[in-house]
């Protein structure tokens, strides 16, 4: 029988529930809002929905701080609302994968409330507790047990006054890290995962699943940057033990079930060498990973909030490396956007002069690689960065913590704000723009974060019936993946690797060849390209100009050709 996994020809759509659609006018998106908008997904043709967290949460990190894994937060609705959404998705032939956030819980989770209550509480060892560093009193600067810097600025340890010990949090202090060395923790997670699979969900996106294994000696990291804190990544990032945990998870949760599941591990800092192991089907770990190489290429010396221009050759080298790495084993995910990344049309494209052309050119280049594409809500409309100008516009704990620490460290506030407005996660979290009405059809109330003013022209309603719209271009890309086996399974071969502005590659399967050629800049480009006469199956703008082996492409002009 055909052993090709179903997800090799699938497209996944990510919903960030608080910004997708609000059904009860409280200004926050919810489950019933999603259910009311499923026709949008069906029109697009996507196969799977990845639902960002809707569990009970104090919302310190917009739901990535969970206080009850088996309850729906009232702001999103009820378990009945969830079951209705799931059955409506299944009725339309779509699958649903949940966001599994088990590197850490909320500090308001009963597990942590118990753990912190006393040193001899049975759940004390469910988290990472340590006394102050030798020679330091509790609360004294430098008393933190390691010098690691948090993803969200500052130390990764917070003192708990009750017991005079520190607890570890790689992210915000309201997100204490679970101790995966403790089998009780692992089995509690597996019980919860089975509970969701028994409810009918089709798999999981696993939040920062490659940092769950810490070096129990908790050594310091090398000092980096100006914060005086150290890089802990070598001591908690993608350690070999992660493979043991994922293989145990597969045995305990998935083995023996006959469903068609999808697992994708979000792995900041993962290398292609490690991804070959994580995604090798024979190892039963995960089906694919989210890697971060390509979305770090525009990080300047100061990191994410100190952006630098992207060099297309770096992008081609990076994505090409991952295509080569996973051509004979494992599988790639393909993404530009998610709820943590600035909007690609503003970041790598042109959200002014060539907004539609650049959005569709970038989509074409990404989607026809070998791998499973992920479309983040609003990306299919070409939604842009928020255009925020003020600190008061921001909601994201990562940005707000960064602002506080960077300004305290002496960076001028306007410099810090500029980096946040360009690269901050709130750019991806403004409400989906459904129509031109006052709150873009997202809510009848006051949205939790401002709607982008460009929704008056940039919205789904304005695009559904426009054959040249971003939406219909994405719809055609999904259709190509569903109809042409060469898109799902063809070998990948990069072309024009050294051209500074043209991204070109070929796919090949059983004699069928597909060519993608795109000019990813705002000025006309040409190149020598030798390819046989072929049929143009998709273009985003202009007529293909290709004479005597020389191709000429206008600004952001992209074409897809097939030669049988
Ligand atoms: O993201 C982890 C992560 O790596 C991002 O926070 C990234 O490092 C940062 O945003 C810079 O791009 C996952 C979730 O996707 C994110 O929303 C959560 O905030 C985080 O884990 C903690 O759960």
Image (cartoon, helix red, strand yellow):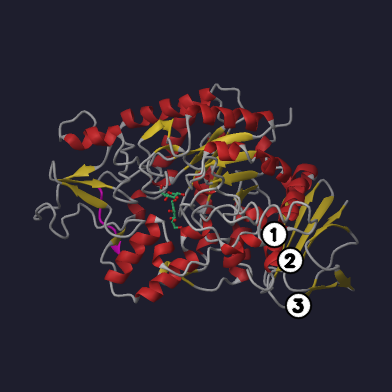
Question: Where is residue 517 drawn, in percent x and y?
Answer: 76, 64
Q: Residue at x 56, y 45 (%)?
A: 21
Under tag 2, what secondary structure?
Answer: strand
Q: Residues within 10 Å of mark 2 (few under 14, many from 20)?
A: many
Query: Relative to 178, is 198 above or below?
Result: above
Q: Are marks 2 and 1 in contact (CB under 8 Å)?
A: yes
Under tag 1, what secondary structure?
Answer: helix
Query: Relative to 178, is 477 above or below?
Result: below
Is tag 2's residue or tag 3's residue first in the polypeptide sequence? 2
Q: Residue at x 37, y 55 (%)?
A: 397
User: How far apart are the two marked residues, 2 and 3, measured between alpha carbons?
Assistant: 11 Å
Is tag 2's residue or tag 1's residue first in the polypeptide sequence? 1
The answer as to whether callout 2 falls within 8 Å of ligand 1 is no
> Which numbered disc covers residue 524?
3
Residues in magenta, as a range: 218-223
User: How far apart are the two marked residues, 1 and 3, measured between alpha carbons?
Assistant: 18 Å
The answer as to whether callout 1 falls within 8 Å of ligand 1 is no
Q: Is residue 282 visible to the viewer in this orientation of the structure?
A: yes
Under tag 3, what secondary structure?
Answer: loop
Q: Is residue 287 visible to the viewer in this orientation of the structure?
A: no
User: How far apart are the two marked residues, 2 and 1, measured between alpha carbons?
Assistant: 7 Å
Q: Is residue 238 left or right of residue 506?
A: left
Given residues 167 and 329, the one toward you in this image is: 167
Q: Residues within 10 Å of mark 1 (few under 14, many from 20)?
A: many
Query: Relative to 222, is 464 above or below?
Result: above
Q: Residue at x 54, y 44 (%)?
A: 22
Q: Which residue is mark 2?
A: 518
Q: Is residue 107 left or right of residue 380?
A: left
Question: Where is residue 542 drawn, in percent x and y?
Answer: 83, 68
Q: Which residue is mark 1?
A: 365
């Amino acid at each position: 029988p055909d052993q090709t996994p179903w997800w090799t020809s699938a497209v996944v759509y990510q919903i960030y529930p608080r910004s997708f659609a609000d059904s009860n006018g409280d200004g926050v998106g919810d489950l019933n809002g999603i259910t009311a908008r499923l026709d949008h997904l069906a029109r697009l043709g996507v196969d799977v929905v990845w639902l960002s967290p809707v569990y009970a949460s104090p919302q310190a990190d917009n739901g990535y701080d969970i206080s009850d894994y088996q309850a729906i937060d009232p702001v999103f609705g009820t378990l009945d609302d969830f079951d209705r959404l799931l059955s409506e998705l299944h009725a339309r032939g779509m699958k649903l994968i949940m966001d599994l956030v088990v590197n850490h819980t909320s500090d308001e989770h009963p597990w942590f409330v118990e753990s912190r209550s006393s040193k001899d509480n049975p759940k004390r060892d469910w988290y990472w507790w340590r006394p102050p560093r030798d020679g330091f009193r509790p609360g004294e600067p430098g008393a933190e047990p390691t010098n690691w810097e948090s993803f969200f600025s500052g130390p990764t340890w917070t003192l708990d006054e009750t017991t005079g010990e520190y607890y570890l949090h790689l992210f915000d202090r309201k997100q204490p890290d679970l101790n995966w060395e403790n089998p009780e923790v692992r089995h509690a997670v597996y019980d919860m995962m089975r509970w969701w699979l028994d409810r009918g969900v089709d798999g999981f996106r696993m939040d920062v699943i490659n940092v769950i294994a810490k070096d129990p000696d908790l050594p310091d990291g090398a000092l980096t940057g100006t914060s005086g804190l150290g890089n802990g990544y070598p001591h908690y990032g993608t350690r070999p033990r992660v493979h043991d945990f994922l293989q145990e998870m597969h045995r305990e949760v998935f083995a023996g079930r006959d469903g068609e599941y999808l697992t994708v591990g979000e792995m900041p800092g993962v290398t292609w060498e490690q991804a070959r192991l994580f995604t090798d089907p024979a190892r039963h770990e995960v089906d694919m990973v989210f890697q971060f190489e390509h979305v770090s290429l525009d990080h300047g010396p100061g990191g994410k909030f100190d952006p630098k221009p992207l060099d297309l050759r770096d992008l081609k080298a990076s994505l090409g490396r991952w295509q080569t790495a996973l051509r004979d084993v494992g599988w790639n995910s393909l993404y530009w956007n998610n709820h943590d990344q600035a909007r690609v049309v503003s970041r790598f494209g042109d959200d002014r002069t060539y907004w539609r052309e650049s959005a569709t050119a970038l989509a074409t280049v990404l989607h026809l690689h070998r791998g499973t594409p992920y479309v983040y809500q609003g990306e299919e409309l070409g939604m842009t960065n928020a255009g925020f100008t003020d600190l008061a516009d921001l909601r994201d704990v990562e940005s707000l913590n960064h602002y506080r620490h960077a300004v305290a460290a002496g960076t001028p506030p306007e410099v810090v704000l500029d980096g946040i407005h360009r690269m901050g996660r709130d750019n991806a979290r403004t409400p989906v723009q459904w129509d031109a009405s006052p709150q873009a059809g997202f809510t009848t109330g006051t949205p939790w974060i401002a709607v982008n003013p460009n929704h008056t022209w940039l919205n789904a309603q304005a695009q559904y019936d426009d054959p040249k719209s971003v939406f219909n271009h994405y719809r055609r890309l999904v259709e190509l993946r569903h109809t042409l086996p060469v898109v799902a399974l063809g070998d990948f071969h990069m072309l024009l690797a050294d051209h500074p502005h043209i991204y070109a590659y070929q796919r090949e399967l059983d004699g069928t060849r597909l060519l993608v050629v795109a000019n990813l800049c705002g000025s006309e480009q040409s190149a020598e390209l030798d390819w046989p006469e072929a049929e143009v199956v998709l273009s985003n703008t202009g007529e293909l100009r290709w004479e005597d082996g020389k191709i000429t492409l206008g600004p952001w002009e992209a074409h897809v050709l097939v030669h049988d």
